[in-house]
Amino acid sequence: MLDFISLVFLGIAGIIAGIVYGFFKCALSYFKAFNYSFNRKYSLKTKAKLGEPAAEKYFFNKQYEDLSNTYESAKSINSGNILMLKSQLNTKSYFTYYRVKTGQKVIYILGNLINVICVSIHFLIVTIISMPIYLFYFIVLCGEKFKFKRGKIGGVCPRCLTRFDIPYYICPKCGRIHKMLTPGPYGIIKRRCKCKEVIPCTNLGGRFKLKAICPVCGGDIESRESSPLCIPVVGPGSSGKTSFIYSTINTLRDCISRERKWNIEFLNENCGDKIKKSLESFKKGIPPEKSDNSHTEVYNIFINSSRFFNEKLLYFYDIGGEYFNSRANIRTQKHYKYIEGLIFVIDPLCMARGEKYIKKNESVKGRFRDINIHDFIDRFILALREINQIQPKKLITIPAAIVINKMDLFGYNGPIEDFLREMGEDALIKKFEYNFASYKFFSCSLFPYEETAAAEVVKWILGETNSEFEFLEKGKHGSVRSV
């Protein structure tokens, strides 16, 4: 009888204690789990994907990662509590036995219910807080993407010739490299570097003012998130490519910029001093040094105007004509994958009938060169098609300006295409007609140097490469003479 009374009273007391214990453990488990997840200061997803040296914002990725981890951890804590209670079942005490058994049942049943309720409330809170942040992020990201797409903004390394969206940026205080300085989990407008320095992570916020390096070779990038216009100048050796580029730079700086009210600026002070010094000699009739055939020389010029959507950065590529002697060499030039235009500089002294037109000029006879201009053009066009994977039946959409150089030696004043036909070079004209959707022939004389010999070429090629340059009416072909 006494055992029965003990069983009833101690059992009831044990059940009540078990309910209180189980409820307490269930309520506590979710908050213990949340504390564990919250104390990890970074999101595993963000670290694995980006791993930037910056402080991560909580309400971007981590809040939902904590939500998931908290729910799973709370279930694990409840399972652990049940196992711990199981070890206390080996007892003769009615109170302890019923307290443990009741506590296990309460934790198992009520624990899952409390977890569902807590995780629902947790989800609702973080979602209400996160929605305005995501909306702001979406607006900023769309603004960035619109500006980049509308302005055709990008980066091009002048050393390794790699093209990219944005470069790696360097913290001005500690020198840490930020590989993805864009709106995201580290900040939408600005982010805080590990050294506590606050740096912008949008173009509109002034990101382009930071020091930048190439993502591939690590060389300095000074393009300021401008719109690149990449135009290689190609031609056989000694055709006058480098002289033509300097004539182009001189024309842009001294004539076209004043006519169009553009602001012209060199890439940096060292680059500007080098070009200015060469231009002074160039205007005196001293031609620039012959381009090296071991690497591509890049000439950069910033062009800005109040009428432009974004600042432009011209890239003129120059390499020794010997580099075009094989398709394998041409294919190694990365920039042919993303160029906006082409300028061919052709020396008429390479043409088969060239000597016939300047017989009286004895000083020029020794300058005729044994170069097959047709093989050169065929080789380059074939390599260009291979690089850009353009089928033979399709026209190349890259606009091409064909400059017949050194025309001052011939004294010819008519249309340049007529001159080519008189020289028996109808096949040369056909090569461009059958391969390019947009092309134009120009004649050019670089003497005297003070005249803007390259003006018409520059206006046409810029107008074809970007709609913000408005000079001449666009057309598939034609001829312009500039002497």
Image (cartoon, rainbow, N blue to C red):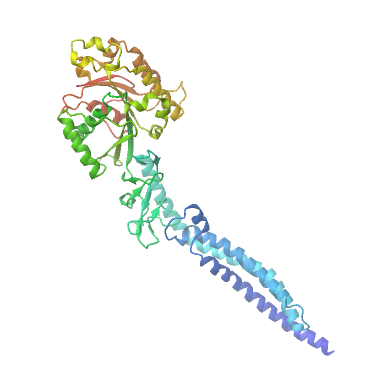
| Residue at image point 27% right, 31% down | 470
Quadrant containing the C terminus in the rendered view: top left
Q: Is residue 46 left or right of residue 369?
A: right
Q: Nearer the viewer, residue 400 or 358?
A: 358
Residue found at the very far bottom of the displayed protein: 2
Q: Quadrant of residue 76?
A: bottom right
Q: Where is residue 466 drawn, in percent x and y? A: 32, 33
The answer to whether one can see residue 262 in this image is: no
The answer to whether one can see residue 275 in this image is: yes
Q: Nearer the viewer, residue 108 or 44?
A: 44
Q: Nearer the viewer, residue 432 or 158?
A: 158
| Residue at image point 44% right, 60% down | 57
Quadrant containing the N terminus in the rendered view: bottom right
Residue found at the very far front of the displayed protein: 366
| Residue at image point 35% right, 61% down | 197
Q: Where is residue 291 drawn, in percent x and y? A: 28, 31
Q: Is residue 428 above or below residue 26?
A: above
Q: Where is residue 307 drawn, in percent x and y? A: 26, 39
Q: Is residue 200 above or below residue 260?
A: below
Q: Quadrant of residue 333?
A: top left
Q: Where is residue 353 drawn, in percent x and y? A: 28, 11
